[in-house]
Image (tube, helix red, strand yellow):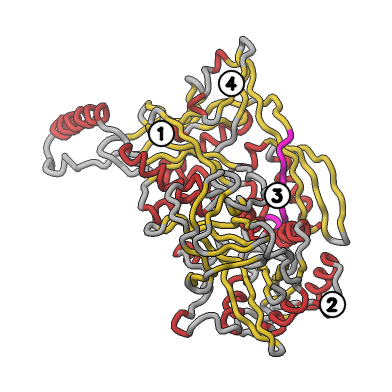
Amino acid sequence: MKNIRNFCIIAHIDHGKSTLADRLLDMTGSIEDRDKQDQVLDNMELERERGITIKSHAIQMDYEQDGKKYVLNLIDTPGHVDFSYEVSRSIAACEGALLIIDATQGIQAQTISNLYLAIDNDLEIIPVLNKMDLEAAMPEEVKDQIVDLLGCDREDIIEASGKTGYGVDRILEQIVLKVPPPKGDPDAPLEALIFDSVYNSYRGIVAYFRIMNGTIGKGDFVKFVATGKKYNADEIGVLKMKMEPHKSLSAGDVGYIISGIKTSKEVKVGDTITQVDNPCKSAIDGFENVKPMVFAGIYPVDADDYEDLRASIERLQLNDASLTFEPESSAALGFGFRCGFLGLLHMEIIQERLDREFDMDVITTVPNVSFKVVSNKGDIVEVHNPSGMPDQKYIDHIEEPYIHAQIISKSEYVGAIMNLCIDKRGILKNQVYIGTDRVEISFEMPLSEIVFDFYDKLKSISKGYASFDYYQTEFKPAKLIKLDILLNGETVDALSCLIHFDNAYSFGRRMCEKLKELIPRQQFDIAIQAAIGAKVIARETVKAVRKDVTAKCYGGDITRKRKLLEKQKKGKKRMRQVGNVEVPQSAFLAVLKLD
């Protein structure tokens, strides 16, 4: 056990985690030449395309130093705030963390929040200054920031470059020297933490675990504590580039277990595995249910695919524990699911993955939060989507959830950030300077205002420096109204939304303009209207595609042309009564990007 080192890589998005992981695999010879490619651990097509890590990936490396052989278990984690849940699980399975900081960018928001996660779990932190080969690197300034943040010595900071491999040998030495070997007793009752799981269509569910205490052998009869289910361990092993079966694994090891589990509900990430005949006294603690920030409806394009969609979302949930869902129905779209996401990027990724991995065509509704509606009689109804809203005449008032938001940023962006928060109906609560050029601002603001584009705007005005954290506080009365979008007089309930009275007009106006660009032209005019109750507040028209019926009339009397145009007009009118307008998926998504 004293030769095992478990560590993860944490960093802000795009600071070079995956590239550095490639070099670590190269240096330890864990990867054959024919398998080499950039960001080798990002094995999802979507990750490679966008250049971001979505899933944390575990891999085992063998390393020799001073004649001793060491086993290094590396977990590469995502950097985007929407996937911070992935990071927290990986951290729970490790004793040390490489904190990667880009020498050209310095310390950024996610660096700090991931660092606090690691410190809360008592991890040994090794600071690495990456991208030293770039001309724009500012090592001295960034080192000052790291010393301020971590309180370490300047000599402890390792200069490295994931691209050229400079400094990687020193990183490996420091991992062996600084990261403590796992604590645990191989002879105690088995306690293993599940930190991830994937679905394999031939072998059922593969759960990845880290053993805290005890030993597990092939064929053991094991029990998952949270669900209470019992299984035989058909195969256990370690994660190299491919899975490598072993006879037994003991305390400190990271590995996988296959036991032919078919239903995804039976594997909960954060659950504890123990043996049936010698169980551990209690489950491993420190695991919490994740709180979704954004809710949206996901519906199959074809109503017959409802059951397939359910199966697909369940399998996705295996691989992404921060996704929550429950069934719901809508007048325009039929049956579907109300899903909870950590943010808009998370929502976009889930939608892409449903399309690519499960070949599901889905429609997503406008994202929103849940409100409390108090009726004239004093009854309280919880409303998750605008179509469940009672008529305006029965409503006394609506209450919306408020949050306490903490934003950490560089002091030069304070003015812009305050403007943004005040535009979003925020109330400034507190402002504290931490260090010379960093400031922490606390706001109280409605949750519904941060759902749309708050995070993206915050990132752009602070050049990616601001970090944002929040917790829900209470419900407060608000002047909210339901905004409907009508196409040819028919309400499209997937585009309806609850919005603050002051923002309704401009939002309706922008929405109509956007839909005009996106809805394809038909044989008849399409009227796009935004309405509050019976009052239309904005309108745009998509003009009809018309055949030139007067082409054959040259010269002669105008009445001949008039007669043909009147005839065409009647046909268009009849067409409009029977014609229906297909709203493309891009229109539902465009609502999110109204700027």
In the picture, the disc for residue 528 is 1
**Residue at 72% across, 56% down:** 466
Of the residues under marks 2 and 1, which one precedes in the sequence? 2
> Type of residue at label 4?
Val
Q: Is residue 206 left or right of residue 454?
A: left
Residue at the spot of label 3: 285
Task: Describe the element under mark 4 as helix, strand or loop.
Answer: strand
Label 2, residues with CA under 10 Å away: few <14, some 14-19, many ≥20? few
> Type of residue at label 2?
Arg
Identify the magenta region. 460-473
Which percent across, then down, holds residue 570? 20, 27
Nearer the observer, disc 4 or disc 1? 4
Spatial distance from mark 1 to mark 3, Cα to Cα? 53 Å
Of the residues under marks 4 and 3, which one precedes in the sequence? 3
In the picture, the disc for residue 154 is 2
Above or below — where is 422 with respect to 531? below
**Residue at 38% across, 36% down:** 541
Q: Would you say residue 519 is visible in this rendering?
A: yes
State which quarter of the image contains the N terminus.
Answer: bottom right
Q: Is residue 52 left or right of residue 485?
A: right
Label 4, residues with CA under 10 Å away: few <14, some 14-19, many ≥20? some
> Type of residue at label 1?
Ile
Of the residues under marks 3 and 2, which one precedes in the sequence? 2
> Type of residue at label 3?
Asp
Which percent across, then down, holds residue 107? 75, 66
Nearer the observer, disc 2 or disc 1? 2
Nearer the observer, disc 3 or disc 2? 3
Label 1, residues with CA under 10 Å away: few <14, some 14-19, many ≥20? many
